[in-house]
Amino acid sequence: MSSPAQARIDLDAISGNVAVVREQAGGAEVMAMVKAEAYGHGLVPAARAALAGGATWLGVAKLDEGLRLRAAGVVGVPVLVCLGVPGEDYDRGVADGLDFAVGAPWLLDELTAAAERAGRPVRVHLKADTGMSRGGATPEDWPGLVDAALAAEAAGAVQVVGLMSHFACADELDHPSVPRQLATFTDMVESAEKAGVRPEVRHLANSAAALTLPDARFDLVRPGIATYGLSPAPSLGSFGLRPAMTLTASTALVKRVPAGSGVSYGHTYVTDRETTLAVVPAGYGDGVPRHGSNVLPVLAGGKRRTIAGRVCMDQFVIDLGDDPLAAGDEVVLFGPGDQGEPTAQDWADALDTISYEIVTRIGGRVPRVYEGGPAAD
Ligand SMILES: *Cc1c(COP(=O)(O)O)cnc(C)c1O
């Protein structure tokens, strides 16, 4: 079917990638991170595919993402909300049985109050700041948070299910912060356990650590980008992962123009001879970065072409030379790479960013078309 722009999502690739990480993680459980629409792949279908691949936990950033999973019938699996904000509807979070990462006293207080109203304990994972200086309690604040959680647990309002932290530089082999964070986490876990915490799971590893740092795996690993088949550390290889997203568009118009034709806003590209141009209906409104003007490769008619001139809101132009292409023919913007198309990593390299940003920003206007995967229920 011809379509302005669509993202085909290979659900079997997602399941397979989780299996790859599970194999690598040697016995640790897998929490598939499905925040931000599963890095652009679609929250619920990606979550189901990850579970089919052997994930036994799901992780999201925001409360609303967890609520959406429950509303879609993803139940009977723990879902960890990593980033709470004061004043959110924690009553609903508790009612839906979500887990919460807790790195600050205010969140413990709000969750405890919600749990008391509900008459059931809330499951929390105490979050340590071991050196990223983002979320989590610093080593100085840690004993206070641990004691407050233990008191809430004794009162029946809280169940401390996990102890967790997050790496800043696990994608850089030999970065000195990595062993430091690992040692700090080990110390903070030990002090919490000495104080009386009995966690079900201790967890620290993102994709990069899960795939390259056996010592960081603990009881559970939290792969995000690897779940979608993109390498967390491209310089170290692909780890046998398969990219799950293929972004395509059908050309809207193909036409001959003379030499000297300025193309798109600002005329930053000018044809140097008579040539054929094609209009591709995907623009920055769909998540094609405007910085990709005159930079990003796409596959058209079996050949790599570079976007000609500026990326517009809804469309961009490519210069086909004398190659024949008709309106409605498919252009592949990026995909797994095995048909000669660029990968999301190629786009990231061309733009000096990371593949995470490329796939995550593919917008809501682009329909996701799911292929393979667990049977729908
Ligand atoms: C996003 C996230 C991850 C996954 O990171 P990747 O580098 O994509 O594997 C793991 N843990 C937490 C807390 C996260 O927010």
Image (tube, grey):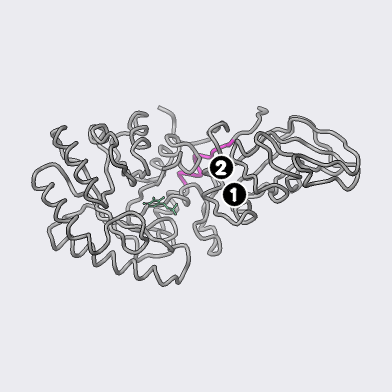
Taking the magenta stretch, the answer to whether it contains residue 8 is yes
| Front residue of 200 and 311 | 311
Q: Nearer the viewer, residue 284 or 230?
A: 284
Closer to the camera, 338 or 78?
78
Residue at image x 27%, y 43%? Answer: 99
Can you name the residue that lies furthest to the left here? 155
Residue 119 x, y percent position in the rendering: 13, 33
Which residue in the structure is indicated by mark 1?
344
Q: Along the horizontal axis of the image, is 41 left or right of 221?
A: right
Locate residue 40, reporting x and y percent: 50, 40
Quadrant where the N terminus lies? top right
If you read the primary sequence from the N terminus, does the residue marked by circle 2 or circle 1 appear first? Answer: 2
Q: Position of residue 23 (x, y in %)?
A: 40, 55
Q: Main secondary structure of the magenta part?
A: helix
Give the magenta part as a residue range: 7-16
| Mark 1 Cβ and ligand 1 under 8 Å apart | no
Question: Identity of the amino acid at label 1?
Answer: Ala
User: Residue 313 shows which numbered tag?
Assistant: none
Q: Is residue 12 left or right of residue 177?
A: right
Quick check: 367 left or right of 315?
A: left
**Cβ–Cβ under 8 Å for marks 2 and 1:** yes
User: Residue under circle 2?
Assistant: 245
- At a point 36% along the width and 56% down the height, the residue shown is 134
